[in-house]
Amino acid sequence: MKAHEIMRRDLSSVEVDTPIAEVIHLMEQSGLASLPVVDEEGVLVGIISERDLIRAALPGYLEMLHSASFLPSLNQLSQRLKEMASEPVSKYMHSQVISVRPEDEDLQIADTLLRNELKQLPVVDEEGHLVGVIRRIDLLYRLV
């Protein structure tokens, strides 16, 4: 089965200047763990994930835990996310995006998801325009 037969055509995505608060709201509403970031013409230019946002809100957290003198502030995450809320997604997105093409086969898609420990993959056409998204569950559901 090919990517275009599996993919969701719901193009939940954000533009590079979308504020982080809006990104978080859209992730929650769509149920997606990551969102493609597109330019004005719909070309995929990046991706932002829940993990990226949590890491940005708590930089170096694991390293700080190794220090005996570290006592975390209980509202550190909330405070930092509020500071980030109006910043553009471009500040935190990854611009090196792993994607697949509409004609890619299911085995290649599964391999790409597993090798890169991804929950979903954007599907892009020859010009790099976002045309869909494939989540792991979409792949499993369509192949049963």
Image (cartoon, rainbow, N blue to C red):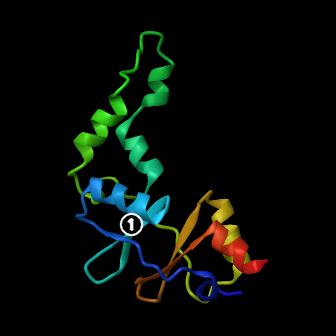
Instruction: Residue under label 1, please give it.
Output: 46
The spot of residue 84 in percent (x, y) is: 26, 45
For the C terminus, the quadrant is: bottom right
The residue lying furthest to the right in this view is 144
The spot of residue 99 in percent (x, y) is: 52, 73
The residue lying furthest to the top in this view is 69
Up-down relation of residue 141 to residue 2 (above or below): above
Instruction: Say which of 27 and 97 sits in front.
Output: 27
Q: Is residue 27 left or right of residue 7?
A: left
For the N terminus, the quadrant is: bottom right
Looking at the image, which residue is at 38% across and 71% down? 13
Q: Is residue 96 something one can see in this rendering? A: no
Looking at the image, which residue is at 29% across and 36% down? 80
Up-down relation of residue 38 to residue 33 (above or below): below
Q: Is residue 73 left or right of residue 137?
A: left
Q: Secondary structure at mark 1?
A: strand
The spot of residue 66 in percent (x, y) is: 51, 19
The residue lying furthest to the front in this view is 29
The spot of residue 44 in percent (x, y) is: 39, 75
Looking at the image, which residue is at 48% across and 10% down? 68
Quarter-wise, where is residue 110 in the image? bottom right
Up-down relation of residue 127 to residue 55 (above or below): below
